Image (spheres, rainbow, N blue to C red):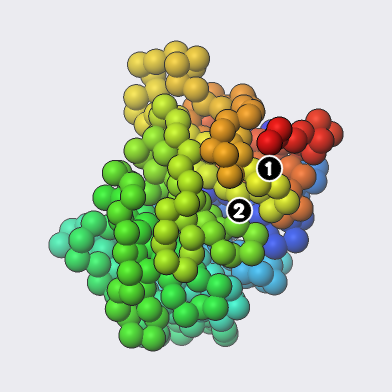
C-alpha cells in the first residue's frame, strides 16, 4: 500500500529494471517509489494542475510529465529537478518517450478553439531552449481527440487510441495516417505493449479490453467485463492479462462497493477466460502495470492509493487445462 497522493491516481509506470515505480495523480506532484519495499524516494514538484500522464525513459535518467496546467515538463530522475518545460495550448493528455529515448511524443486536448494535436519533439539534450524549439513533427487531429498513445518499436510509427474508439497508425516520416481500425465503441483509456512489442492491449470505456496485432491493427482477442475498463496490462512471463476498471468516478457514490466491483481481474490471454480477481481498492482502478520480471503487479485507484501486489507460488504453478 503506497499512500503519497491526496487525490486520484491517473497513471503508474515501472522503469525498465522495475526497481522504481512512478505514479501521478490529480494532485500536482508525481511521486517515485522503491517498488520492492514501497518506500517513497521523492516527488517532482512544479506542476500547477492535475498530472495526466507520465513516462520514464529506458535508462531511467529522464522523466516526462504532462498536466492540466498546459505544460509538459522534463525532469532529471536522479535529482528531481526540472530540466525542460514546454507550454501548450491545452492540457497534455498523453506523453511517451520513444523506444530509443531520443524522441518523445505528446498530445494535447481539444479545448478553447484549439485542435487536438500530436507533437514529436527531440529530447536528446534538454535545456531551457526546449520551450521555444520547434517540434520535429506536428499532426493536427481533425476528428475525435487522442486519449492514449504508443510508439512502435523502431520509432517509425505511432499508434493512437481515440475518444470515439478509433485506433490509428501514423507514419512519422510523412505525418500521414497509415491505417486505422474501429473495434471499440467508446473512449480508449489505455494501451500497453506486451514484452516483445508484437501485440498490445487496449482498455476501453465500452466495458472491454482488446488485444491487437501491432503490424496491421488486427483484432486478436476480446476480454469482456461488466463495467468500463480504465487500464489493462500484459504479463511479461505468462499469457495473462490484468484488467482494472470500475464505473465512472462520479457515479461511484450511487452504488455499493460490491456492485461497483473495484477489483483487478486476471484473464488468460489466449482463452479470454477470467481466472482470478484481486480486491482492495475503494474506487475505480485507473491504472495497472506489471513489474518487468512478472512476479508482481501494481494498481492505482481513484482512492489515491497505489497497491503493489506480489504473486504467491500458487499463481506461478497455476496451469490452464487444455
Q: CA distance from mark 1 to mark 2?
A: 10 Å
Image-quadrant location for residue 274: top right
71 w.r.t. 237: above or below: below
Image-quadrant location for residue 15: bottom right
Give x and y (percent) for residue 105.
44, 71
Horizontally, is 174 left or right of 224 in the view?
A: left
Q: Quadrant of the C terminus?
A: top right
- Counting every numbered tag in the picture gives 2
Q: Residue at x 30, y 44 (%)?
A: 186
Q: Residue at x 42, y 59 (%)?
A: 218
Q: Quadrant of the N terminus?
A: top right
Horizontally, is 205 left or right of 140 in the view?
A: right
Q: Residue at x 70, y 47 (%)?
A: 238
Most distant residue in the right direction = 313
Q: Are marks 1 and 2 in contact (CB under 8 Å)?
A: no
Most distant residue in the left direction = 113
Question: For mark 2, does the 10 Å Cα neighbourhood hold few (<14), some (14 to 19), or many (20 or more) residues?
Answer: many
Horizontally, is 89 left or right of 142 in the view?
A: right
Question: For mark 1, does the 10 Å Cα neighbourhood hold few (<14), some (14 to 19), or many (20 or more) residues?
Answer: many
For numbered disc 1, what is the local secondary structure?
A: strand
Q: Is residue 188 among the parts visible in the rendering?
A: yes
Q: Residue at x 37, y 31 (%)?
A: 248
Horizontally, is 171 left or right of 201 in the view?
A: left
> Which residue is labeled 2 in the image?
13
Q: Is residue 299 among the parts visible in the rendering?
A: no
Label ID, residue 159: none
For numbered disc 2, what is the local secondary structure?
A: strand
> Which mark is first along the chain, 2 or 1?
2
Give x and y (percent) for residue 251.
34, 24
> Which residue is labeled 1 in the image?
297
Give x and y (percent) for residue 104.
49, 74
Give x and y (percent) for residue 74.
53, 69
Amino acid at each position: 500500500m503506497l499512500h503519497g497522493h491526496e487525490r486520484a491516481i491517473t497513471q503508474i509506470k515501472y522503469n525498465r529494471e522495475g526497481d522504481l515505480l512512478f505514479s501521478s495523480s490529480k494532485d500536482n506532484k508525481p511521486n517515485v517509489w522503491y517498488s520492492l519495499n514501497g518506500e517513497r524516494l521523492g516527488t517532482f514538484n512544479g506542476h500547477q494542475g492535475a498530472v495526466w500522464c507520465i513516462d520514464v525513459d529506458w535508462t531511467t535518467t529522464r522523466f516526462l510529465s504532462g498536466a492540466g496546467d498546459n505544460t509538459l515538463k522534463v525532469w532529471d530522475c536522479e535529482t528531481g529537478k526540472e530540466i525542460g518545460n514546454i507550454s501548450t495550448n491545452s492540457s497534455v493528455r498523453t506523453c511517451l518517450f520513444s523506444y530509443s529515448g531520443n524522441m518523445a511524443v505528446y498530445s494535447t486536448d481539444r479545448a478553447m478553439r484549439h485542435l487536438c494535436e500530436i507533437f514529436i519533439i527531440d529530447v536528446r539534450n534538454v535545456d531551457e531552449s526546449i520551450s521555444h524549439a520547434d517540434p520535429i513533427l506536428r499532426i493536427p487531429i481533425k476528428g475525435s481527440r487522442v486519449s492514449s498513445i504508443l510508439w512502435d518499436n523502431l520509432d517509425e510509427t505511432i499508434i493512437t487510441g481515440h475518444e470515439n474508439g478509433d485506433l490509428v497508425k501514423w507514419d512519422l516520416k510523412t505525418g500521414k495516417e497509415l491505417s486505422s481500425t474501429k473495434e471499440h465503441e467508446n473512449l480508449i483509456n489505455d494501451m500497453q505493449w506486451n514484452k516483445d512489442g508484437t501485440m498490445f492491449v487496449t482498455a476501453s470505456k465500452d466495458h472491454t479490453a482488446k488485444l491487437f496485432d501491432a503490424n496491421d491493427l488486427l483484432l486478436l482477442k476480446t476480454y469482456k467485463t461488466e463495467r468500463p475498463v480504465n487500464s489493462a496490462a500484459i504479463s511479461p512471463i505468462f499469457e495473462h492479462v490484468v484488467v482494472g476498471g470500475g464505473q465512472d468516478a462520479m457515479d461511484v457514490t450511487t452504488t455499493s462497493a460490491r456492485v461497483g466491483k473495484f477489483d483487478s481481474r486476471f484473464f488468460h490471454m489466449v482463452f479470454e477466460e477470467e481466472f482470478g480477481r484481486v480486491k482492495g481498492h475503494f474506487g475505480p482502478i485507473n491504472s495497472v502495470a506489471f513489474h518487468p520480471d512478472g512476479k508482481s503487479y501494481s494498481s492505482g485507484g481513484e482512492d489515491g492509493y497505489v497497491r503493489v501486489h506480489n504473486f504467491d507460488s500458487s499463481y506461478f504453478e497455476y496451469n490452464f487445462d487444455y
